[in-house]
Image: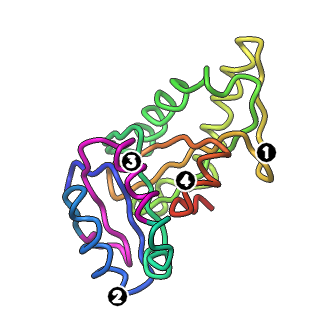
Amino acid sequence: MKDWNVVVTVFDEEGFRLARRLLRQFGTIERTEYFNVLVMEVPEIEAFTQAIAALFEDTPGYLNAISRIVPAHAVFDYHSPEEFLAKGEDVVLGWSDMLTDKSFYIRLHRRGFRGRIVSPEAERSLDDALLRRLEERGRPGHIDFEDPDLVIDIETVDDRAGVSIWTKEQLSRFSFLHID
């Protein structure tokens, strides 16, 4: 599936069956070539996120089979590490107003481009771009891995990236995110 906007990871084959059965009501879901990774295309991210939260509240046992569900607030395609960083920077800089005077970090879960995109280096590059932007505005933010106000998550599958930003409250409420 080329136009996904949600990444789902499961623990095992039973998790695949459960995820497909549960999640197909919300959009198109397909298996990827990556171990225990599915992608979805849903029409409306916020409505999907709320519906999944309600589903897991009603049946928390589903989290025993489905490891993570990460909806993307922004998606982009790329063909090189340089294009990935440029487009990723455009997205995260677009959220700089939300990050003013806040603590945050960026987490990249990469599938594909092995050896070409190095997750810690890409995270640092995007963190640095965001910190520079905030400093230029006179409203610096700072990196905090222990108790951040916001977390930016980047999920890649081959040459597509989904980027989302989550508040501390959302991370607490949406147990299916499992950003780290």
Q: Residue 76, position in %: x, y?
A: 34, 39
Q: Residue 83, position in %: x, y?
A: 40, 37
Task: Check if residue 141 falls in the magenta segment.
Answer: no
Residues 43 and 75: in front is 43
**Residue under pointer 1:** 144
Residues 121 and 59: in front is 59
Give the distance between the C-alpha atoms of the residues marked 3 and 2, in whole angstroms. Answer: 26 Å
User: Residues in magenta?
Assistant: 31-55
Give the distance between the C-alpha atoms of the residues marked 4 and 3, in whole angstroms. Answer: 10 Å
Image depth: mark 1 or mark 4 in front: 1
Image depth: mark 3 or mark 2 in front: 2
**Residue under pointer 3:** 161
User: Which amino acid is tagged 2?
Assistant: Glu
Which quadrant is home to the C terminus? bottom right
Give the distance between the C-alpha atoms of the residues marked 3 and 1, in whole angstroms. Answer: 23 Å
Which quadrant is home to the N terminus? bottom left
**Residue under pointer 4:** 108
Q: Residue 126, position in %: x, y?
A: 60, 37
Residue 26: which quarter of the image? bottom left
C-beta proximity under 8 Å, tags 3 and 2: no
Mark 3 nearby-residue class (10 Å; few <14, some 14–19, many ≥20): many
What's the residue at 42%, 39% (across, down)? 73
Q: What element carries label 3?
A: strand
Task: Check if residue 38 falls in the magenta segment.
Answer: yes
Give the distance between the C-alpha atoms of the residues marked 4 and 2, in whole angstroms. Answer: 26 Å
User: Which of the two labelled residues, at mark 1 and mark 2, occupies the earlier sequence position?
Assistant: 2
**Residue under pointer 2:** 14
